[in-house]
Image (cartoon, helix red, strand yellow):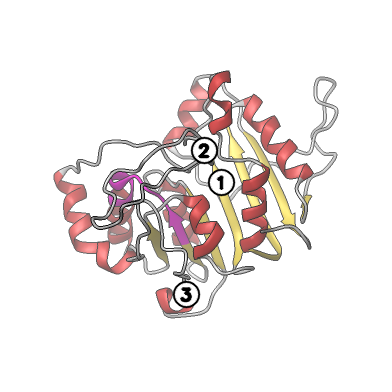
Amino acid sequence: MSTEPMQDADTPQGNPQPNFRTKPVSFVRRGARLSAGRQRAWDNYRDEFVIDVPRHIADTSVDPDYVFDAGTAFGREAPLIVEIGPGVGEAVVEAAKEHPEQNFLAIEVYTPGIAQTLMQIGRHGLSNIRLIQANAPEVLETTLPRESVDELWVFFPDPWHKARHHKRRMVSPHFAELAARVLKPGGLWRLATDWADYAEVMREVGDGASGFTNVHAGERTSAEDPAGGWAPRFEGRTLTGFEKKAGEAGRGIHDLAYRRTSGGGV
């Protein structure tokens, strides 16, 4: 994630205007080289499971006129769960296995992570996952229809733990407006992080956001933290390798859950 002006790589030819982003994005540029196994998964499953979205200037942007149609993408109508930044897909794949009655959309830019997710989709014979390779805030702002999502998951976003980088954190008041835009009334916005200071920022953003109520307001208080409001660990989130490493490093996991009420959104 970065709030500093940046021009994305692979600006389409013929477009003279560079794309400078001034708001946090959902990714950090990483290498895109694939192992042999991931390349096979990409070749075999990409066309079926990765939505071929039209681009807008950058290779991680989506044309703002494009609107995702879940019924067409999945071939059915079902509750839609969206996960932002699934990494290698551990949580979303396990959830899709456990809930075949639900549709899952993963938003990720990291090509090896998408390829690993595709490998798991193929291994388990799943049909209820789709992926969009794009910057998540843009997807929330224009790609997803208003009030079309039943749950929005933001698990372990980049913490940008150095103080000078805090401005790059994705969860912000503006991001909360985007979350409110896409969630159905009554829908849930679930968050988790292993960085205590980022957890407090997330809680501040969620508690202050128009159109949301904290499902666990006043719960799990302590002398050091009389505000509380933390959710119990979300049982629908499989224990990933990343979360295990956080625990081994002594970092506690903070969960939050907000319900979409009314108002808010952009």
Which mark identifies residue 69?
3
Q: Which residues are magenta?
A: 105-115
Which mark identifies residue 157?
2
Give the residue at mark 1.
Answer: 154
Q: Going by the image, does 181 lie left or right of 86? A: right
Mark 3 residue element: loop
Looking at the rendered structure, the kind of residue marked 3 is Asp
Mark 2 residue element: loop
Q: Position of residue 25 (x, y in %)?
A: 48, 42
Q: Are marks 1 and 2 in contact (CB under 8 Å)?
A: yes
Residue 166: say if magenta: no
Note whether 45 is above or below 135 in the view shown: below
Closer to the observer: label 3 or label 1? Answer: 3
Spatial separation of the CA atoms under disc 1 and disc 2: 7 Å
Q: Position of residue 248 (x, y in %)?
A: 49, 22
Spatial separation of the CA atoms under disc 2 and disc 3: 26 Å
Which mark identifies residue 252?
none
